[in-house]
Amino acid sequence: MTEAVLEIWPGRPQPLGATWDGQGVNFAVFSEWAERVEVCLFDPKDPSRQTHRFALPVTTHGVRHGYVPALPVGTLYGLRVSGPWAPERGLRFNPAKLLLDPYARSITGRPELPQSGQAANETPDDLVLDPTDTAAVMPRCMVVDHGFDWEGDRPPRIPWTRSILYEVHVRGFTKRHPDIPAELRGTYGGFVHPVAIAHLQSLGVTAVELLPVQQAVDEGFLRPRGLVNYWGYNTIGFFAPDVAHACSGALNVVNEFKGMVKALHKAGIEVLLDVVYNHTGEGNHHGPTLSFRGLDNPTYYRLTPEDPRYYVDVAGTGNTLNFDHPQTLKFAMDSLRYWVQEMHVDGFRFDLAVALGRQEGTFSRRAAFFQAVHQDPVLSQVKLIAEPWDLGPGGYQQGNFPVLFSEWNGKYRDAFRRYWKGDDNLAAEIGYRLTGSSDLFQLSGRRPTASINFITSHDGFTVRDLVSYAKKHNQANGEENRDGADENDSLNCGVEGETDDPEVNALRDRMVRNFLATLFLSQGVPMLLAGDEMGRTQRGNNNAYCQDNEISWLDWELDERRRGLLDFTRSLIRGRLIEPVLTRRDFFQGHHIFDSQLKDVAWFRTDGAEMQQVDWQKPVLRSFGFLLGGDAIGEVNERGRRVTGDTLLILLNADSKPAPFVLPAVEWGSDWEFVLDTSAGRGAGPQGYHAGGTVTVPDRALLVLRRTAAAPSPSPRP
């Protein structure tokens, strides 16, 4: 049977991509250097069968466009682009390669790359044009209908000061959950099953930070090992939710994702996306031609000036997107706005964000990407988080991002890992990290909430493994344990890996509680790695990016020990959110605020005296305390009323032996009650501590006391 001849109208140059208007589909594709852009249509019932192939007839300002009337939702398509083959000039047009539309809203799956290290559709010599047609191994783009009943969805809009982030993988969160139907486990729908929502709410987190959910591609070297890119930091479809997490395929994946966001919003939880705009999944000059390379290589990628055959690579993945070009910048802005406006997400965490701020190779906080975000009426209003490093020259830029961005604080992570391990020469840095890292963020006009504090993240050990392994154990990744960081500031508490030794396990449990308590007692925004609240282990793997299995998935079968940790974490989050001194907007000043009786923060030695400058310079200072003045917050609420709260005294002891602490003199408070002891993991204990009395903090433990009686009035100011 012969297919009907398609009628092709001129169409419109905007919006880019394939847009269904209820009557047909408009196709618009940008390519500055192409000579011809063709659309290939495929049979939805047999995607291997091409039904039509036609050239987009009109060019407007570099955009090829055309309109096909009567083309329905669900139409499968790909692109073929003709132009010069001149790799030495950076031009790699090859019409034998079926390409994904960069603006595709849905993609049917991942490319089926070969079982070898060589990409499916490139010859060993990248200077030679490869005539192999790739339609058989490429997924298809799909035309979608964006109609969706949001039921009046409104984002929770939780202030940064009240935010508790939960870094989590959509698939790994529910894949092993016994109370979720098998067909929903590991999907967008499973993520918002009532039992999953109940866990998030009972934990007290205010936002999920989802590992990449934009359509990704697996690296060719993984398939021979029987592995995949589980984390998803290898994006190829920046508008398309990854269909691997959908339970009903590419046609409904957009609505499934929207349904997940709507359900989380109803539960009062924000949705942040971890996004990868520093590179794409096409790799280096030997990588597969999947989309951008074949569409307009010198526009989308940074090419080396001395030889445009090669790619600038500051991400360690083979290529870097070129934000010096206005079309690439427009592409990123269009994509980000799409996720906010159409998909209702609440913000983004930008992977290797230094790469986004490079102008002609050098990082600048005034780079075009940051300026575009700053002036954008949509993107400037959502939560923005930068991972403040990449692998290029000058790639560590902690504290140097513009005012709208918060940052993953790697210095916070490193400092507290080293402190609780017992390292020396950390006193001054610990002081900064506990109080919001003013040394990193204050000069740029930002507040403590610019610091996203974390002990662990997807990249590295879990908190349980942090205290169970002195070395990485990445053999399952198939790289002979060469991958992953060698320096983790971890300790195994005397035994490498799992053990039945009760003393070792007791110490490990205490260390885990120390890390979590420190996280939620620090100024800034805490980020909890999913599963750390339940003692999840990756068996010592600190680079589980390719482990789509029980190494990475959350284990919901809790024994008494893990259930106790979950309860402890819940209590920490509840305690943080009810104590105004822990969620301040502004940095501490170290003195009295207005007419406050107490300083906003004061630091104490174990003898009860305030710390002096010489104390901060001591090479060994593992035991100290600090007081947060509840009447010296110096802020007003939304009604203009002055904020006050409880006064807390936090005592830390990273030494291997107990530390007696003398409580501060009576002018700081006459009576104190016990709140928290990480050595026992309890939230209640002996009461009735008094000024000048002695409290013994167990070895490697943290205590929190709350003032119950003020100093005698009038009180002399210390």
Image (cartoon, rainbow, N blue to C red):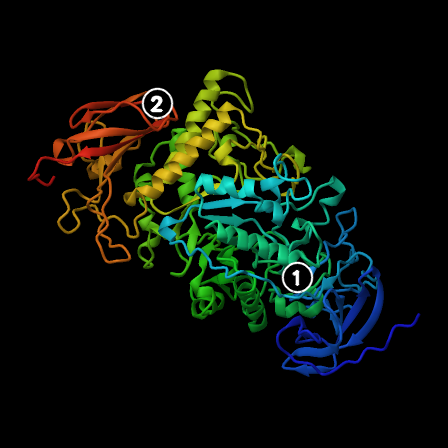
Relative horizontal placement of residue 338, taking residue 642 as reference (left or right):
right
Q: Residue furthest right?
A: 1
Relative horizontal placement of residue 45, taking residue 211 as reference (left or right):
right
Whichever of callouts 1 and 2 sits on the residue coming sooner in the sequence is 1
Image quadrant of residue 446?
bottom left
Instruction: Say which element carries label 2.
Output: loop
Q: Residue furthest left?
A: 714
Where 91 sits versus 685, above or below?
Answer: below
Kindly identify the amino acid type of the residue bearing the numbered disc 1: Tyr
Q: Residue at x 58, y 29 (%)?
A: 557
Q: Position of residue 136 (x, y in %)?
A: 82, 58
The 10 Å Cα crowd at callout 2, few under 14, some 14 to 19, many 20 or more, is some
Kindly identify the amino acid type of the residue bearing the numbered disc 2: Asp
Give the mark toward the camera: 1 or 2. Answer: 2
The 10 Å Cα crowd at callout 1, few under 14, some 14 to 19, many 20 or more, is many
Instruction: Say which element carries label 1.
Output: loop
* Residue 517 can be seen, yes or no: yes
Where 590 sits versus 68, above or below?
Answer: above
* Quarter of the image where the N terminus is located: bottom right
Q: Position of residue 523 (x, y in %)?
A: 33, 45
* Quarter of the image where the C terminus is located: top left
Task: Tell me the residue that label 1 is attached to.
Answer: 310
Image quadrant of residue 648?
top left
* Residue 455 can be seen, yes or no: no
Q: Residue at x 56, y 70 (%)?
A: 330
Q: Nearer the viewer, residue 667 or 131?
A: 667
Q: Which mark is residue 699?
A: 2
